Amino acid sequence: MAMTAKTDRRLREERRGFRVDGPTKALIERAAQLERRKLTDFCMTALTDAARRTIAEHETLVLSDRDRAVFFDVLVNPPVPSERLQRAFAEHKRRVVR
């Protein structure tokens, strides 16, 4: 879906600027040229991809095979609630659920 220049400008209201050293700038410019993309487009795509990867790494829980087996076993065969847990549920119901 093609965007008009006016629409594109409205979507990019926030401006971010940063300084880079000469070798880094040359590296980024070369990469953008190799992909035949505008420098801004190349940088925005790279930054967005890096941000998504970082968020995914922090929001994803990776379990070992053993941990996964224990987790699913507890889901399928939940333990009987202890007396302490039953008291906690009763207290929660008394305070929150009315």
Image (tube, helix red, strand yellow):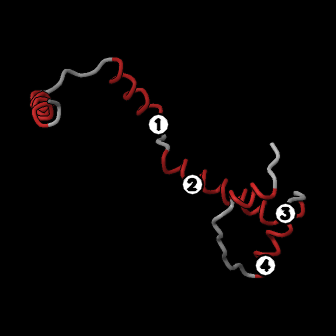
| Snapshot quadrant of residue 96 | top left
Q: Residue furthest toward the top?
A: 77
Marks 3/1: CA distance? Answer: 43 Å
Residue type, numbered disc 2: Thr
Sequence-first disc among 4 and 2: 4
Nearest the viewer among 56 and 77 is 56
Sequence-first disc among 3 and 1: 3
- Secondary-structure class at tag 3: loop
Disc 4: which residue? 23
Disc 1: which residue? 64
Q: Residue at x 67, y 60 (%)?
A: 47
Judge the density around disc 4: few (<14), some (14-19), many (≥20) Cα neighbours within 10 Å: few
Q: Residue at x 9, y 27 (%)?
A: 83
**Image marks 1 and 4: residues in contact by CB distance under 8 Å:** no
Mark 3 or mark 2, which is nearer to you?
3
Residue 82 place in picture, x, y as percent: 14, 27
Residue type, numbered disc 1: Ser
Mark 4 or mark 3, which is nearer to you?
3
Marks 2/1: CA distance? Answer: 21 Å
Mark 1 or mark 4, which is nearer to you?
4
Residue type, numbered disc 4: Pro
Residue 53 place in picture, x, y as percent: 60, 51
Sequence-first disc among 3 and 2: 3
Q: Residue furthest toward the bottom?
A: 22
Disc 2: which residue? 54
Mark 3 or mark 1, which is nearer to you?
3
Q: Residue 38 carries which label?
A: 3
